[in-house]
Amino acid sequence: MNTKILEEIGLTQGEIKVYLALIGLGEKTIGPIVDESGVSVSKVYSILQRLAKKGLVSHIMKQNVRYFRPADPKRLLDYLREKEEALKAHEDELSKIIPELSLRENSVITEETAQIFDGLRGIQTARERTLNIMKKGDEMWIIGIARTPYDRLTNYFREYHKRRIAKGIKCKYIFNEYAREPFGDDAKAYPLSEVRFMPEGMITHAWMEIYADTVTIGINFKKSISVVIQNQEVADSFRNYAKLLWSIGKK
């Protein structure tokens, strides 16, 4: 008999051996169960207790001797359903505390913290942070956008900006001139968005995202990486650089 499914629904090897022994024996005392299962007497008692808690074994007393009997094998289906219900309850409880855990995750970032996120997923993780901490009416800057950020991330960025706009967050972009088509022109059509372009011939493969008290430096050229710096003074300094570039940028 293939007992793999019994393991997968949560029975240990010892529990399987003892339960199968009882199925074959019927109602028996501890001795025959030990002999049939091959499990030592020191372990059989605790295993029987666990099986009893799972509703798979019961016992009766006869002349001060304890006899154990297995539950009908159909009880295994009931046990599986109970586990599924318990897991669903755990899922519901976990869903309730995830927002609190997310808040605590943000709180561990101190007033002066730098984090590095590798890969394309890292770029997305760093960008998603903007939606977690910004609120309606806030403004972010994205400076130095070339074509390279959109390599393999075009759909993500477009979907991100839809969510940004839905949340009411403003954005000012400064693109490299050679990224005007189609990316710069696309961005101009977004609500809550303003777009300007750097002088022609100026190409940057790293871009900056400035929002709240944070600066993110992103790179998606040969290597994909985001460096997130959370420091109000640093963010304010980069915001001043952004305003200067904005003043000389072309519409």
Image (cartoon, grey):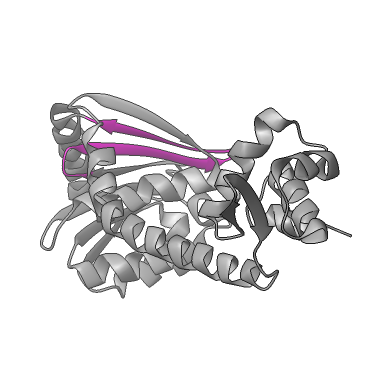
Exactly how many numbered labels are in the figure?
A: 0
Q: Quadrant of the C terminus?
A: bottom left
Helix, strand or loop for the magenta stretch, by majority: strand
| Up/down of 65 relative to 237, above or below | below
Determine which quarter of the picture holds residue 158: bottom left
| Up/down of 191 relative to 240, above or below | below
Determine which quarter of the picture holds residue 214: top left
Observer-nearest residue: 201 or 43?
43
Residue 50, image x, y percentages: 56, 46
Residue depicted at x 36% and y 50%: 127
Left or right of residue 89, residue 6 in this image: right
State the residue lying farthest toward the right.
Answer: 1
Residue 206, image x, y percentages: 44, 39
Residue depicted at x 27% and y 37%: 215
| Up/down of 122 relative to 82, above or below | above
- Would you say residue 223 sits in the magenta stretch? yes
Residue 203, image x, y percentages: 46, 43
Magenta region, residue range:
211-230
Residue depicted at x 71% and y 31%: 41
- Would you say residue 169 sits in the magenta stretch? no
Q: Quadrant of the N terminus?
A: bottom right
Residue 222 in sight here: no
Observer-nearest residue: 121 or 183?
121
| Up/down of 95 relative to 176, above or below | below
Residue 3, image x, y percentages: 81, 56
